[in-house]
Image (cartoon, rainbow, N blue to C red):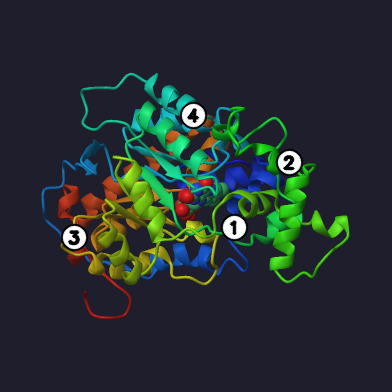
Amino acid sequence: DQQLVPISLTDLEHNAHVTMSINALDYYRSGANEMQTLRDNQDAFSRIRLRPRILRDVSKVDTTTTLLGHPVSSPICIAPTAMQRLANDAGEKATARAAAKAKTCMILSSWSTTTAEDTIAAGREIPVDTETPGLPLYWFQLYVYKDRVATEQLIRRVEKVGYKALVITVDTPFLGRRLADVRNVFKLPPHMTMANFENKDSKVTMATILDQEEAAMEAAEALLEKNGAGKKKETRVIRQESSLAAYVVSQIDPTLSWKDIAWVRSITKLPIVVKGVLTAEDAIMAANIGVEGILVSNHGGRQLDGVLATIDALPEVLEAVRGRNVEVYLDGGVRKGTDVFKALALGAKAVFLGRPILWGLAHDGEEGVSLALSLLKQELDLAMALAGCCKISDITRDYVQYGHAARL
Ligand code: FNR
């Protein structure tokens, strides 16, 4: 159980397992239920084979690309993960700075332990190096609250400080059942808060996340009832619940539907990305409603266990929106340069990293996140060169053999 000098994302994960508290580690690493989808997200990449081309001049490889028109240094970006201060006290600020240095896109979670304002301000403290291409880019991940006034207030705040897109998470009407969190009765340490909701005017407070609160107890009880655990239970049983799951029941709107996406569309000029699409049917709905982006995601295997690995869902989503003006991204299980390459070959515009960023944060704050991003970027550079691709647009379907079937 020694820490390693990390030379891959797997090493960073190993180190986090050695150093993190069990409450935080379990919250970060878990998937829902039997964690089949969690495993499959990574395994599915291994089932895809590469078809490299040889004898091309690959002395210079260029990974720059664009996201909704914004230039970034590479298609390796940062997925929204809640509560980053559980990994390192600098939390979201450290991630924002590392994103700025890497000139890539960071999506900030609604459930950050630093406010949206402070996070983007931290990123902007980093002087932008104009010698190399790309610019830092910040998007905001939105959970739609039952309280639409609070939801709209949050949208106005992130518009004002310069987030460039809203990423609406659509796979979480309820929180998936993560058994370790239930057992640990997961909660945030009392000195941390869901910072975006801490202003005293906000009706959506963090109070519900603390297990002493009546509201959380009621919500936990409601959830238990919903899960078939019977009516009134003893307090001991009621407490056997993740506070986050209870918070979602009390605050997040399970009635969310396409008309709410249209509502967000109608109240903001920011581009919208829907996060959590896994099927052609929903991709078509999203394109029809006029979103700018689709993030193929199963929430890192943390919601419905048994759904498709994201790399397996990607082809049908792309096929469904072919010719439409929608960018398609992917997250889930991306750990190696060849995973990024495979996702791009199948047609993703970019990939987003969830847990590896948290492992980087846990390892060494901002430096650790920079390390995670640069290790993967170097692996992508090498994969591109060895496959005979000098730029992102060179990476096409011809470079992968998908499953056992003939070439797509
Ligand atoms: C997440 N994810 C997530 N998604 C989201 O839309 N809002 C959120 O607040 C969070 N929070 C969160 C916390 C933790 C600890 C994890 C691991 C994940 C999901 C995340 O954005 C992304 O979809 C997955 O993490 C991608 O899978 P990998 O890269 O972790 O395999």
Front-most of 124 and 146? 146
Residue at the far left in the pictured view = 56
Marks 3 and 2 in Cβ contact (< 8 Å): no
Q: Is residue 383 left or right of residue 354?
A: left
Q: Which residue is tagged 2?
A: 210
Q: Residues within 10 Å of mark 4 (few under 14, many from 20)?
A: many
Cα distance, mark 2 to mark 1? 17 Å
Q: Kindly state the secondary structure of the residue where label 2 is placed.
A: loop
**x and y percentages locating residue 343 in the rendered image:** 31, 59
Q: Height in image: 132 above or below 350? A: above
Disc 4 residue type? Ala
Cα distance, mark 2 to mark 4? 26 Å
**x and y percentages locating residue 157 in the rendered image:** 43, 30
Q: In percent of the image, x 38 and y 54: which residue is there?
A: 261
- Give the foreground label among 2 and 4: 2
Q: Kindly state the secondary structure of the residue where label 3 is placed.
A: loop
Q: Earlier in the sequence, mark 3 or mark 1?
A: 1
Cα distance, mark 4 to mark 3? 36 Å
Front-most of 70 and 345? 70
Q: Earlier in the sequence, mark 2 or mark 4?
A: 4
Cα distance, mark 4 to mark 1? 27 Å
Q: Earlier in the sequence, mark 3 or mark 2?
A: 2
Q: Quadrant of residue 375?
A: top left
Q: Which residue is tagged 1?
A: 175
Q: In percent of the image, x 75 and y 51: which residue is there?
A: 185
Q: Which residue is tagged 3?
A: 324
Q: Kindly state the secondary structure of the residue where label 1 is placed.
A: loop
Q: Earlier in the sequence, mark 2 or mark 1?
A: 1
